[in-house]
Image (tube, rainbow, N blue to C red):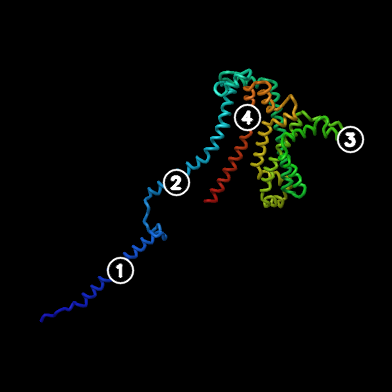
Amino acid sequence: MTQTVQDGPATGREARGDSELAGSLGASRASLARRRSAGRAGLPPVPPHAQGPAHPASGRTAQERLARRRRWQGLALVAAPVLVVVLFVGVPVVNAALFSLGFTGGLNQALADIGGDTVRGFSFAVYATLLGNATFLRDLVATLGVTALSTGLTVGLAVVVAVILRLRGGFLGKTLSVLAVVPIFVPVVIASWSILTFTDAQGFLRSLGAQFGLDVPVWGYTLVAVVFGSVWTSLPFAVLMIAGALQGTPDALVEAAKDAGASTWRVVWQVLLPMAATPLVIATTFTVIGVLGSFTVPYFTGPNAPTMLGVDISKYFQAYNRPQQSTAMAFIVFAFAAAASVFYLRSTVRSNAGELDKKRQEQQ
């Protein structure tokens, strides 16, 4: 007998499975369509990790374009001030240097034709003549002497005021700090005239000494008056620089030194001043440069001979009609100022390098 297998129920289950699979595929397609339409409608996009990896070459190209754009933007920002410095500082300096070396053509033609004792053709004859002139050497020595003495007094007084303000404070420190900063608000011309009337033969010092039978020396129209005026005009900047540095010294360092038995002198010499080394160098450098090139103070208060090189430059250019010699004098003054600025640049570079090293260590 042949037995017949009934496969009707199995076939029905397979049909139902196919229908369920088709329904799930349709639902997935509908969900994907809704997501695409939502993205086009402005809803949040698909996360980057779900979009698949980007091509590395395209990413590097975009980063390079961004870096290149930023470099050009930086160059555009600094182009204007650099151009101003080049046109109004660099070109005149180079032109003056060439004129002092005997190049009298081009922009120097007018000065060469008008001025007297002009040396034509490349040579160091102008500098050799100046350095062989006893009057110029005397004025050079006077200028360097006044600069050294004025700088020493200025920095010394600034340190005293800053130390008193840092360690004692109170009424004395505030009074000294105010008196030291007042000259910054007084014009140099008025200050020079005041110093002259204070130190000349009929000035305050002579009158005060006469009341007590004292013969006070006359310092008006001498290099002593020039030193007074130079200290007066340079002291405010030095006080602000050094006092600011000492105020920034942590109290813990000072207290630790005192607890260890250090005297006030050792605290100042071994704690405060080393912490203010860079501001001290800056104050000293700017004082040297300011006194070297000063004109108003030595012109009003100084003697006719010897005189400062700033006054000599003006006399040679205007009164003596020797512009080439005055230009050479200016470059000699510039050489001494550049030598003084080396210490400032060295200290600044060291300070910046130390700060960069600290930042790298913090980042690591």
Which residue bears the numbered disc 1?
Answer: 24
Residue lying furthest left: 1
Say what secondary structure mark 3 lies in. Answer: loop
Q: CA distance from mark 4 to mark 1?
A: 89 Å
Q: Residue at x 68, y 31 (%)?
A: 294
> Which disc number belongs to residue 334?
4
Which residue bears the numbered disc 3?
Answer: 212
Q: Residue at x 29, y 69 (%)?
A: 23
For residue 239, what is the image quadrant? top right
Which residue bears the numbered disc 2?
Answer: 66
The answer to whether residue 237 is above or below residue 317 is below
237 left or right of 199 in image: left
Say what secondary structure mark 1 lies in. Answer: helix
> The residue under label 1 is which amino acid type?
Ser
Q: CA distance from mark 3 to mark 1?
A: 118 Å
Rendering coords of residue 308 (x, y %): 70, 27
